[in-house]
Amino acid sequence: MADLTYTELQRIEKRAKVSGTVGKTVTYFLLTLWGLIVLFPFYWMLLTSIKSYSSYNSEYVPKFIATHPTTQNYVDAFTTVNLGRYFFNTVVFTVLTTAVMMVVTVLAAFAFSRLKFRGKSITFAIFLSLMMIPNELVVITNYVTITNWNMRNTFQGLILPSVASVFYIYLLKENFEQIPEELYKAAKVDGTSDLKYLLKVMIPISKPTIITILILKVIECWNSYVWPRLVTDNEAYYLVSNGIQEIRENGFGRENIPAMMAAVVVISVPLVVLFLIFHKKIMEGVSRGGTKG
Amino acid sequence: MKKLSSLKGWLYLLPAILFLGFFMVYPLIDVVMYSFEEGYNFASQSHFGYGLYNFKYVLHDPYFLQAVKNTFIIVIITVPLSTGIALLISLGLNSIKPLKELYQTVYFLPYVTNTLAVGLVFMILFKKTAYSEGLINLLLNSLGMSSVDFIDGPYWAKIFVMCFYTIWVVMPFKILILTSALAGVKKDYYNAARVDGTSKFRIFYKITLPMISPMIFYLVITGFIGAFKAYADEVAIFGTNLNAAGMNTIVGYVYDMLYGNSGGYPSYASAASLILFAIVFTITVINLLISKKNVQY
Amino acid sequence: MMKKFLGRALRVLLSAMLLSLTACHGSKGLDPFSVPESFDESKHYEITFWAKNDTNMTQANIYRQAIEDFEKLYPNITVNMRIYTDYGRIYNDVITNISTRTTPNVCITYPDHIATYLTGANTVVPLDELMADSRFGLNGTELKYEPAGAIVPKFIDECRLGDTAYAIPYMRSTEACYVNKTLVEKLGYTLPDKLTWDFVYEVSEKAMEKDADGNFKVNGQKVMIPFIYKSTDNMMIQMLKQKNAGYSDTDGNILLFNDDTRSILETTYDAAKIGAFSTFKISSYPGNFLNAGQCIFAIDSTAGATWMGPHATNHDIAEDKIIDFDMVVTTIPQFDTEHPVMISQGPSICVFNKADPDEVLASWLFAQYLITPEIQTAYASTEGYVPVTEKALNLPSYIDYLSKEGIDEDLHYAPKLQASKLLTANINNTFITPVFNGSASLRDAAGQLIESVTKSARRNEKVDDAYYEKLYKDTASLYHLDSGMKVSTGEMKKQEFGPLPTTSKVLLGLIILTWVAIGGTYLYGFIKKRYGKNNNK
């Protein structure tokens, strides 16, 4: 009886193993396939960027490797277009916007989660309903506002309308609320001020969520296009995203696709490198941001 | 004391209220104003009265209707498809151990890249020019199929490229969310089920799916909203003259009415964007109602 | 105390918002400009100049040099330049900036576009008075530079809307046909002095013959598009003009959608269907194909001449792809070679009105500086352009330049000089289309018709009466040609709509139904809850 069960068990296990191996192979195959679909455009981008202009244009059947790789396109990307300047602007824009946004968000989230005041719930409801509004809707008026304030082609003009973000307030408020109320009460008894409590207790505890918000905002800033395109018409204030469009339209003579690709690579690299270094943190963060929303 | 704390609350909220007030609430009211100022345009700075003319104009404009059609097609095709594929991939990811992290990292890559930039690459891959059929067409040819002009060709081909790219763009987020949701399903449930000799499919259907259904619903809602706001991806592939390409979306229509070659009409743009808002709002409410009823937490 | 302050702050904020809302949209506009008594040189002026160049660094440098020189002459004026490569973008940006009163001071643009700018009150400065002004005019005595002198009458007339000049011309060009003579002869034809459309289409059709390997017989290559047009709007406009057919009238009535247009489109369709015709938007730059021996008739602006020919100064394609051939620069094809007709085009300069008349005067001084002989001839010789003033045209150095055709392949590149001469020889055969608010859109629509038909031909779509009817209707709607703008009255008219289209009905119906359903479920739930409660009691 015991013997029988034993052999039976072995056989079942063996069968499971075989079907498991087949299943695993199929799984790996499909996963790899999707991986290739994801990576291929990046590969093509890199490949095209090291092909010389003439060899790119003479390939009826595109080649999968560059026979005579060149770095000329990258030299062009930095010399013909003021890419360095665009980079600097984007970094300034991203850092300042994110910093101001963080202060505004933390204060608002704290008010909603810990402080008691009249009209809190109705205000919060109004805030939430603002989440539904597509950005495109408000761009026109913001443009007029910024012009009236004489802030076109300034960093203020770029930053101010990009600061407010209801979603992040909501995200952080949810997180703050999970911190036990008792801590707050104890602090109050100790005579700790609200601001001190916020800085010393709440922010350190909510660090992961704050990092999440940071990451999401940085990505958002780096890729923002419509607003910068509108309020800047001076090259000195272009961001990299305007840069791409600028390059597409008049950067390198007519239709120089390899040079365009080089510029695209240069523009994409900072975020990709950041991502590769901090990929665990970033993915954790985005996933947390996603699940809370 | 009580008054003081009330004051303090508002004080903490003040920066947020200022920013939102100036750059969100006020513009919103402004948009509503525009939408009732009939035929207002930037050049003449005048309108012929107040009323529903702008809405009428937009609803009669064949390009708006084309945009509505395109947008609905994007939504209907990409949302279920991308969610479904993301679920399959996440299940696959969850069933393996070695290389799992590598795959996850690779899958997430598109999330951190500029969609305008990668769209350009897609355009090059699909475009058929006099000099080259384009890589995708050569691939089709080698499979014995004839070439298709994906960028300038028949409607279905353009829709295909558009949906393919949209899915490519939204995938990273969905895979990530679903993978972590799947990882969160407690192993105990599975073990209990396995002891009972339940089939794999049944386990998935009876245990996994209900456990992750809130996340799926969440992805569907955000997917709907995101797809209704599609614009940048289309520009990257088909260029800025989306109306002539027949590939415009509602947001693209709004944008063109404002700044495009036929632009300068905030009145029509506002009317169109309010219609978009009505659609998105309705769908969100439906989603919320359904999820309240059906999702098991 | 604190609360009071806060309450007040909020109230101020709210009232500020409301105030700006009750003000509604639209501004009163500026007062009309009148020439000031004198130019106040003690004041500092900062003026913005939006320029256009053709992806050509030399042109940008000429602008820069001009600005530098100008600022030396007038140290109290600073000129900020922004360069565009696309007139459409300039147009869009100007329109957006009219509403915020942040228009540039001086702008390079098309007269078509100015017509739209003019719908705002006093946005653009009328220039007749300024041009004739004895101190600051074209022959002004108080200018710090050599006066520009008279503008070629035909060219300044093109800048008039009604009787008023709202711009001065900057450069003039027309279109030319760049022909690969070698291939024409290889196909067994002799290139006539004056091209006809029939000839172009006939040769193009012949060029489509392929050998057994699928290569084109005429050039032995896989690619051959015998006839490529750069600006299809010009193609349509010139063909209609040559046929004396309707396009638009000076009152702003749109006559484009007629039977002559249809017959032009049908010819285009037939050629496109066999691959003998294509456009820039669909296939890319004509010059690229021409230089690679893949095109026989390339029609492009004379201002594109430096990109044309085997020895072209500029080129996009790889050196080893360029094929040697005999190129002829000739006038565009005609229906009636006895009476050639071609378009006159090119950038013009307009000056925008500002609250401070001195600022406007400063802008005018700069705008005028751009048409002084030195700058005119320098800029004109970067491409196949023609200067716009008599002085510049008769400048000895310019005459000398024109006489040195082909002595080198750079400054004196033969096709470039031939292109310029093409226009100077034909000034009296040029025409422009009536300018009115909406004429820019009409122009776009004219080009779109050809683009659409060409695309349809490439896709083997069936074209019949219904196709053309729909094409006309769609194009009119895309460019708001049906929005009823009337120039004669200066007012826009509301459009009469028929019943709602089905898609709209479905859309609205769906939204309403959904809300009814949502309301229904809510009500149902509410009643059930109440009823259930009552029952429990």
Image (spheres, coloured by chain):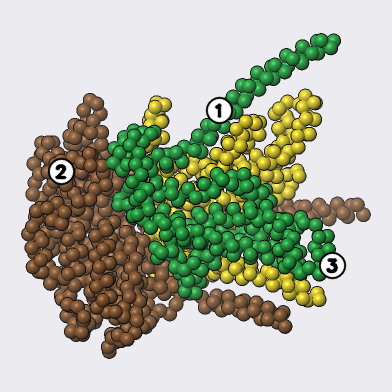
Kind of residue at badge 2? Asn
Name the side, left or right, on which B221 lies relative to C86.
right
Q: Which residue is mark 1?
A: A29
Q: For chain A, what colour was chosen?
A: green
- Residue C459 bears which disc, if any? none
Q: Which chain is brown?
A: C
Q: Chain of mark 1?
A: A
Query: Residue B115: percent from the left, percent from the top?
Result: 48, 48
Q: Determine whether the residue tagged by mark 1 lies in a helix, strand or loop.
A: helix
Q: Give the alpha-carbon distance from disc 1 to disc 3, as whole Å.
A: 61 Å
Mark 3, residues whose alpha carbon is within 10 Å: few (<14), some, or many (≥20)? few
Q: Residue at x 77, y 13 (%)?
A: A8
Q: Which residue is mark 3?
A: A189
Q: Chain of mark 2?
A: C
Q: Residue at x 10, y 61 (%)?
A: C401
Q: Determine whether the residue tagged by mark 3 lies in a helix, strand or loop.
A: helix
Q: Determine whether the residue tagged by mark 2 lies in a helix, strand or loop.
A: strand
Q: Nearer the viewer, residue C440 or A155?
A: A155
Q: For chain B, what colour was chosen?
A: yellow
C71 lies above or below A139:
below
Q: Give the alpha-carbon distance from disc 3 to disc 2, as whole Å.
A: 92 Å
Name the side, left or right, on which B245 lies relative to B219.
left
Q: Nearer the viewer, residue C135 or A139?
A: C135
- Ranked by sequence position, the earlier of labels 1 and 3 is 1
* Nearest-to-viewer mark from 1 and 2: 1
Q: Residue at x 62, y 80 (%)?
A: C12
Q: Which residue is mark 2?
A: C180
Q: Residue at x 62, y 55 (%)?
A: A213
Q: Give the alpha-carbon distance from disc 1 to disc 2, as whole Å.
A: 54 Å
